[in-house]
Amino acid sequence: MARMSRREFVKAGAKGVALATIPAIFKLNPLTAFATPAKENATLSDYYAHFGVDESLVRQVMAAGLERGGDYCDIFFEHRINSYVGLLDNAVDRAYSDVDLGVGIRVIEGDQTGYSFTEDLSPKAIKLAATTASNIAHEGKSVAAVALEFHPSPDYYPLKTLWEDVGIERKIPYLEKINEKVFSLDKRLVKSEIGFEDEGWYVLIITSEGRVVYDYRPMVTISVNCIAEEKGRREQGYFSLGPRAGIEYFTPERIDQLAGQAVRNTIDLFEAVKPEGGEMEIVLASGNSGILLHEAIGHGMEADCNRKGISIYADKIGKPIAESFVSIIDDGTLPNYRGSINVDDEANPSQKTYLVEDGILKSYMHDRISAGHYKVKPTGNGRRQSFRFAPLPRMRNTYMLPGPHTKEEIIQSVKKGLYAESFTNGAVYIGAGDFTFYVATGRMIENGRLTRPVKDINIIGNGPEVLRNIVMVGNDLKMYEGGGYCGKDGQHVLISDGLPTCKVSSITVGGVAS
């Protein structure tokens, strides 16, 4: 198999036919020269230089943003390097790398936002973007200069090697090992497709309040798709791992986990049945079923939906919305989890936020605008997909705390119901919380025991109602470790979620007619 050097790989597009255009800034300020020192040894001038700017230009841009009298301005610089290599049946079939660079400038007046961005980091282009964003403001006023102070951030995703320093020659052996393991586990496997995506994301944020923060955000996802065949029937399964971590995350044990779980998710489907539909008790498995918590409940607790009166939780702060043993947290500080952030995209420090405590709604997830509206501090939830977007209140790692029951107690309490392990292809109406989810993996519960695997079913319900109908919570909290994204208002951000085993007294299951 032909191998490419890291430099050749970064420049080569898919199938080697397209060359990436390297902006002039990278020739003047090569990434390797910047990234070599440890982050704690870098200076503010180093961070500016990474994007080809200096403090004088930053001050001029800030002044242009506030020239018409806005209350606040922030500047969001971004440099992102994303790479992918795919293996199909033991042969590399796709490889590419993308480089993205730009700056977004936001001006706020009251609860109104002016936003502009540019991929051109010349002084003229950045100042023009700032002037465009300033048009939200209505009356000019003088803006006093403030001292720009760098604020060091904690490191919730430490890693030994930057992803842009990991060549394709180090990635392919991981894919080959997974592929070999997949086919060794079951003779019914006929096809496998494995993807390896990694990303290094540099951000520099400067606010008109004088706050300067820098962050390097790693991301990696290895995904495994399997197809198995038995007696002319084919089934397909999937599994992935996707942390904010370096290549050292993928130990031999995790390689075995990737292959083993993907194969199990596939082979189990040969024994799967489609149960009768209707209202029934459902046990949500610990871990991946936390996506139901995220989608059907979490979005309704994002503050912009409540500020606009869209969410069913808009008047519920301080009120009971669940049983006393239910507590829900959104947390950006879990080491190496996909939704963790050292700082949010408004330069606010990340934190652990209690949304629901002992059944009482305690807080929403706030960005700067919603925090101002509610007269509270931001919770570190102002997030954006890239410099092309203004930030919104978004989840990070959302999970339910462990409760007083065991998994065995919960399952034994169900005479006939569904044990849902993982979901996919969900749709949620954020305001009311109505949802539908396809059950990817699960089992029937019959007379207090897990029995047959299930397939081709979906569940239909209402998030706030499900929250009220959680009648048992297990002591086995597990976080989902796969490659999750969350979409909202046209933006996608990295997230994770988690759940202990939970029993919901009633959800509608779409199955066969009884």
Image: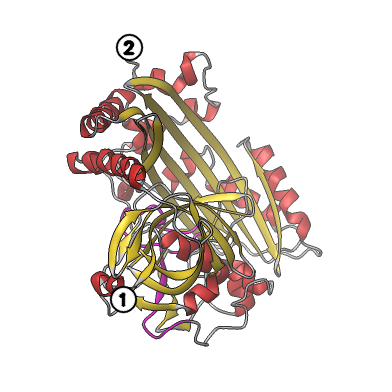
Quadrant of res 190: top left
* Local SS, label 2: loop
Residue 449 is inside the magenta segment: no
Q: CA distance from mark 2 to mark 1?
A: 58 Å
What amino acid type should be assigned to the residue bearing mark 2?
Answer: Ala
Total numbered labels? 2
Q: Position of residue 50 (x, y in %)?
A: 46, 39
Question: In the picture shown, does residue 172 fall above or below 42?
Answer: above
Q: Which mark is residue 413?
A: 1
Residue 347 is inside the magenta segment: yes
Q: Position of residue 512 (x, y in %)?
A: 51, 56
Mark toward the start of the polypeptide (2 vs 1): 2
Q: Position of residue 188 (x, y in %)?
A: 29, 31
Other-residue count near label 2 (Cα within 10 Å), few / some / many at <14 / 14–19 / ≥20 = few
* Local SS, label 1: loop
Extent of the magenta region: 322-349
Q: Position of residue 376 (x, y in %)?
A: 55, 78
Regarding residue 433, the answer to whether it shows in the image is: yes
Q: Which mark is residue 2?
A: 2
Numbered disc in front, either 2 or 1: 1
Question: In the picture shown, does residue 341 fall above or below 200?
Answer: below
- Left or right of 403? Residue 251 is left
What colour-coding does the image apply? secondary structure
Q: What predominant SS class does the magenta segment belong to? A: loop
Quadrant of res 7: top left
- Left or right of 61? Residue 40 is left
| Residue drawn where x is 32% and y is 12% of the image | 2
